[in-house]
Image (spheres, coloured by chain):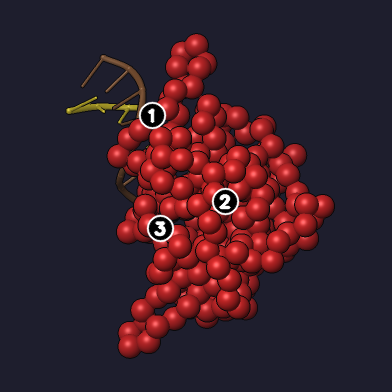
Chain colours: A red, B yellow, C brown
Amino acid sequence: MSGRAFSRSFFLQPTVEVARQLLGALLVRRLRRGRRGVRLVGRIVEVEAYLQGDPACHCVRVLKDGTCVPRPSPRNRSMFGPPGRAYVYFTYGMHHAMNVVAQKPGTAEGVLLRALEPLEGIEVMAELRGVPVHRLRQLASGPGKLTQAMAIDLDLDGHDLSKPPLMLLQGRRVEPDRIGVSGRIGLAKAGDRPLRFFEKDSPFVSRKTKS
DNA sequence: ATTAAGATTGGCT
DNA sequence: GCCAATCTTAATA
């Protein structure tokens, strides 16, 4: 199960295209467990794109007249940085979520990783999640579950995803007719835009698909 | 300084 | 389906 990192130019494509093409890619986490090293691998099956001029994006401020302006802040600074890095944030007082940063520095767009198909290191993932090993579908079917299963937290904010201990590698491509599209989940604003992409057949995607 | 909302999850009805 | 948990961030004063 090898695979190579994505090129810089990959992340400079339109972010929606980056999102679609990240389906099928592998997220690989190297962890130290006591004296041993462990490798956790998941295949990306669900993502959402967050764009400039998008009221739902953390990097945008919505003015009274409805216009959106970039809003750099300590939390979202990774999104304004180089592409191919991680933007990890903490929310609801208990969950982390991870994005892959796209576009050149200064342009804050990214792809939220929402669900993985667990492939390797499943026992460790289950332990990190606090669920029985056989409950495969509960391991990473949601942005908060995914980060918990892969031991991703704020320490990895800004991390270059072409290097250990957290890598994004090319996998087998998901054919366009196998990709489902819907509105994004859990948003107060702009939830209607078709910016969520998922593998239609996968039992590992998160739940409610509004649309 | 104060406060409201949040790219969620899990448990309960 | 509904709601509490939990606390940081960002907006408002």
Q: Is mark 2 on a helix, strand or loop?
A: helix
Q: Residue A71 carries which label?
A: 1
- Could you say which quadrant of the image residue A122 lies in? bottom right
C-alpha separation, residue under disc 1 versus residue under disc 3: 22 Å
Q: Name the residue under label 3.
A: A160
**Left or right, residue C2 beside residue A37:** right
Q: What element carries label 3?
A: loop
Q: Give how far across and how far down residue A8 sits, in percent.
A: 50, 52
Which residue is at the front of the view, A16 or A112?
A: A16
Residue A58 visible? The answer is no
Which residue is situated farthest in the bottom direction here? A35
C-alpha separation, residue under disc 1 versus residue under disc 2: 25 Å
Q: Give a yes or no on whether discs 1 and 2 share a subunit.
A: yes
Q: Give a yes or no on whether discs 1 and 3 share a subunit.
A: yes
Query: Looking at numbered disc 2 in the image, what kind of residue is underneath it?
Result: Phe
> Going from the N terminus, do you reach mark 1 or mark 2 first?
2
